Every structure is written in C-alpha cells, then in structure tokens.
Image (cartoon, helix red, strand yellow):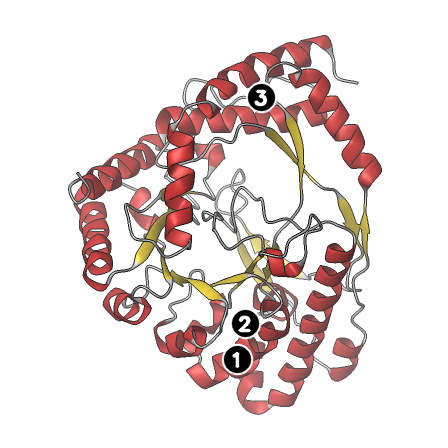
Amino acid sequence: MISAKDREILRELAKRYSEIAANPVNKERFRRGKDANSLRHGRPLVWLDEIPWHEMDIGGELALRCEGAFPREMEQFFRRMLYRWKYIQADMVAEDAYYIEKAFDMTGIGIDVREDIIAADKNNHIVSHSYKDILETPEQVEALQMPVVTARPELDRARVDDASEVLDGILPVRLRGHGIYHAPWDIINRYRGVEPILIDMIERPEHLHALRRKFMEMGIAQYSQMEEQGLLDFDLSDIHCTPPYADELPARDYSGSVRMGDVWFRGMAQMFSTVSPAAHKEFDIDYMRPIMDRCGLAYYGCCEPLDNVLDILAAIPNMRKIGVSPWSDEARNAERLGGKFVYARKPNPAFAAGDFNEEAVRAETKKTVELCLKYGCAYEFVLKDISTVSYKPQNLISWVQTVEATIDSYYR
C-alpha cells in the first residue's frame, strides 16, 4: 500500500517531470542518437552517467521524503531526472512514461567474493578492493554452477498496478525488459584478483581457458533463459550509459517476441589494457563471439584503450560502437573507425574533480570534435565513472557548459 502522503509527493514530482518529457527537444535528441548509432553524421549527443549523487545535492533537491520502499524508488527517479534537467541536462532524454524493469530471480554460481575493502569516503560506493583467489584450481572452476533464471511476472503486475494508481492521469506506466551485458573479466577478477589472472596467461593458459569457457557457458545459459522467458528488450533507456537508439533494432523480422537478435550486445575487458592483441582476442573476444554473434548490434569497450585491437573488433560483422577511453590514442581510433563505427568517446572524469579546469575540458572536447570531423566519424560524448566531484556540484555543471559551448562553435 502507498500512503496518501507518499502519493501526494509522487504526483507532484511526476507532474513536473511530465512537463519536461513533453518538451520537443527529447524527440530531437532521440533522432540525433539514432542518427549516430546508424552511422549518420551530425552533432554528437553529450550524456552523463554514473554520477556521484551523494555529492550532488543542492538545497535539498535530492533529499527523499517518501516513506515506503517502492515510493522512494519512484521518488529518486523523478528527483534525479528533474535535477539533471535543471543543472546538468546536456543531451539527456526524458521519456514520456514511467518505466518499470521486469523482475527476475537468478541463482548464484556457487561462490561468493572474498575481499578486503578500504573506503576513503563512507558515503561513496567506490572503494578499494583486495580480492582473494577462490578460482585457483581446476576443481574450483569445475564446481561453478550454471545460473537459473526465473521471471517474476506477478511482481511486475503488482508494481505496474501500484505505479499506475499513483500516476493516473499524469504519466503512463510501462514494463521494460533488459539488455545483454556480458563482461566476465569484470566479474572474474573479483573472484581472483588481477595478478593471478595475468600470471596464468603465461604460466597456466589452459586453466584460464577453462575458466573463461565456463563463464561463456554461464552467459549463454543466462541470456538464453532470459530470451525464453521474455525478459530481453530493445526499447531501453541506455546501453551501459550510452544512447541505445538505432534504426536496425529490432530486427526486420521482429514479430513481437524479443530475441537476442533484436538487442544490443555490450562487452568489455577493462583489465586487458596491458595484454597483447593476440591474448586479448584469445582470452576474451573469441569467447564473446558465441553470445555477441546472436545479437543485433555490438558495442565493445569501456575504460580500456583499444588501439591495438581495433582491427580485431572491426572484423566482427555486427560491431557498431567502439569505446574510446581517456587513455586511447584518439587520432588512431578516429582514423581506423572512420565512418564505419560509432566513436564512443569517454572524456576524462578526473577533469570534473578537484578544482575545475575549464581549459583542459575545452581542449579535450575540441580535439575529439576535430578528429571526428576530419575522419567522418559518427560519435558521442559520454562522461561516466564520475567517482567524485570533490563535493562540488558546480564542477559537473561547469563541465557540461564548457563541453556544450565548445561543440556549439562547430555546429552553428
């Protein structure tokens, strides 16, 4: 049950949100995002994600006032979206509905992370980890369990009914499925630590192959079950922080039941920034292909520089978007990607911390724009992994203003 007080709070926030969702600029941004992902050139979208919300409050605008757990979840969405629109809008898209993600349960794989943690800020979930190696032996790898996925349609119905009652006459409530996000090395290193993995590449490659093969099989099991149970979706708000819109999704033969071929594949191997192209392909990309090849479009890369594996990625038929991190050789990426792939630029989040350096942000943005124009790249800017703004919300506000003004000078 949602209390009268919580209902009143939510309805007032939803009314304000519905006004921004009705703004025509949302459709224009949607179109520009679709243009980029379908390799049509134009002004790039600027998005922000992974924001340190605990550092961002201004005048109590982010403080939650609802009491119930589900109302607080709804309230947080509305308050953050209203905040973003007011202060750090960039090219965010406010959708004209309130979406509820389809619920499902998934069994574990039979082990739990063992680690030591050091936190510099008790309010920040970004902490330092020291992981214990619990996948050190063939027996430990063999004992890993295949995940079992169970959809929860009864919970979906209850949540949709509750939200619909609250938002009646203001916003429609819609159910939304999930995308495919397969990044095993971001998970395996939490069960082993990074050093043992890199050492095993040289000293015990067969053990590493057995481990990666197991995680490939677990990924296939998870997403095949999600496909069978109607849990996948192409109509998403983002694909791991970036614009998801594309002409090619869903596939042309889509008939109402979402398949893997109707959605984006999202993958990365951030800890592989120090390995050779051959090792990157052997221990990650080759194991991604059985899942990646079943999907409609593929997006690869995050914080790791991919300069040395661009040719390998470019040879994948459904590859569409490739990450260009702050540690990448931008010119090499722009020349190689050209008009064939989306240049998914990740600006340096460190520039939003400490004392804001407007000149550094302007120079970084200018370089990206000029390279993408020179080589005919469809591109985007996504500032993410913003672990801190040093409790200075103005840093992020200034970052958006600087980047937008710099891009404006090229697209008048």
In the foreground, 224 or 386: 224
Residue position marked by numbered label 3 in the rendering: 64
Mark pair 1, 2: CA separation: 6 Å
Query: Secondary structure beneath disc 1?
Result: helix
Q: Residues within 10 Å of mark 1 (few under 14, many from 20)?
A: some
Q: Nearer the viewer, mark 3 or mark 2?
A: 3
Whether the residues at callouts 1 and 2 have beta carbons within 8 Å, the answer is yes
Q: Residues within 10 Å of mark 3 (few under 14, many from 20)?
A: some
Q: Amino acid at mark 1?
A: Leu
Decide if residue 112 is in sight here.
no
Mark pair 3, 1: CA separation: 44 Å
**Residue 378: percent from the left, percent from the top?**
32, 56
Residue position marked by numbered label 2 in the rendering: 194
Name the residue rendered at 54%, 72% in the picture.
194
Query: Secondary structure beneath disc 2?
Result: helix
Residue position marked by numbered label 1 in the rendering: 198
**Quadrant containing the N terminus in the rendered view:** top right
In the foreground, 106 or 16: 16
Q: Amino acid at mark 2?
A: Val
